[in-house]
Amino acid sequence: SYELTQPPSVSVPPGRTANITCSGPRLWDKFVSWYQQKPGQSPILVMFQDTHRPAGTPERFSGSNSGKTATLTISGSQAMDEADYYCQAWDSYTAHVVFGGGTKLTVL
Amino acid sequence: VQLLESGGGLVQPGGSLRLSCTGSGFTFSNYAMIWVRQAPGKGLEWVSAISGSASSTYYTDSVKGRFTISRDNSRNTVYLHMNGLRAEDTAIFYCAKDVNSDDFSSSCYDSWGQGTLVSVSS
């Protein structure tokens, strides 16, 4: 089965840049999306098709996909950005939606 | 856009439940829908997907043969019929709206419901 791998946790001081990575085979032929989930809340989409921000996602959020690793970057991290972040892609070989294991972002 | 799930509850191992997710604020039939679950303290796990026309359905391996996804576009509702429930199925189940109808290669999910809790225990 296809898997996306994320680091379990990332810590960043307020105002600094946080990079959350997502790796997997053949990422070059996939679009990666990112979701933010705060405790007790449903996930929300913060990045789609690797680099596109939905309306409402702050400009400090950006995304990239090198073909081996997708990265969600939060520039000037704020306390309100503390959350779990999940990457997601569609694997056409298995016809499965795949989520990464999630990364807990701590801003302190 | 709103998604409202219902149908969760406590069920014994081997039992059945039917989850419903009703959408509003968008043309329901134009979008694929998925179910995602989250076990207590764990990450998101995709369960099943259905295209806007219901012509295509997909399942994660652990639920194949036990769960069935369907939709009634006249009622703006997607269902998840769950049979043979196991303790490891205990989770919050979310429905989510795709941005596409039938092309899953660029799928992402721009609206999510509040979730419904399924507990499987004797």
Image (cartoon, coloured by chain):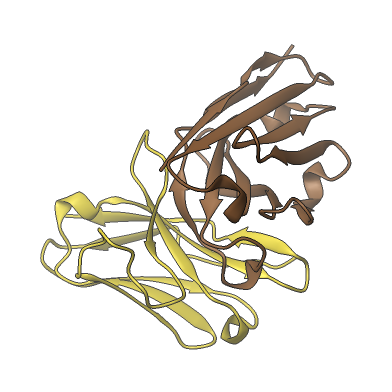
Chain colours: A yellow, B brown
Q: Is residue A13 left or right of residue B116?
A: left
Relative image position of residue A106 (x, y in whole percent): 26, 54
The residue furthest right is B65
Relative image position of residue A80 (x, y in whole percent): 19, 50
The residue furthest front is B74
Q: Quadrant of residue B82?
A: top right
Q: In this view, does B96 lie to the left or right of B77?
A: left
Relative image position of residue B13 (x, y in whole percent): 80, 19
The answer to whether any part of residue B104 appears in the image is: yes
Residue sitting at x 75%, y 50% = B54
The answer to whether any part of residue B31 appears in the image is: no
Q: Quadrant of the N terminus of chain A?
A: bottom right
**Is B89 placed above or below B33 here?**
above
- Using the image as rendered, state which of residue B42 and residue B3 is in the foreground: B3
Q: In which quarter of the image is the C terminus of chain A?
A: bottom left
Q: In this view, does B118 lie to the left or right of A66?
A: right
Q: In which quarter of the image is residue B36?
A: top right
**Is A50 placed above or below A47 here?**
below
Residue sitting at x 46%, y 43% = B112
Q: In which quarter of the image is residue A61?
A: bottom left
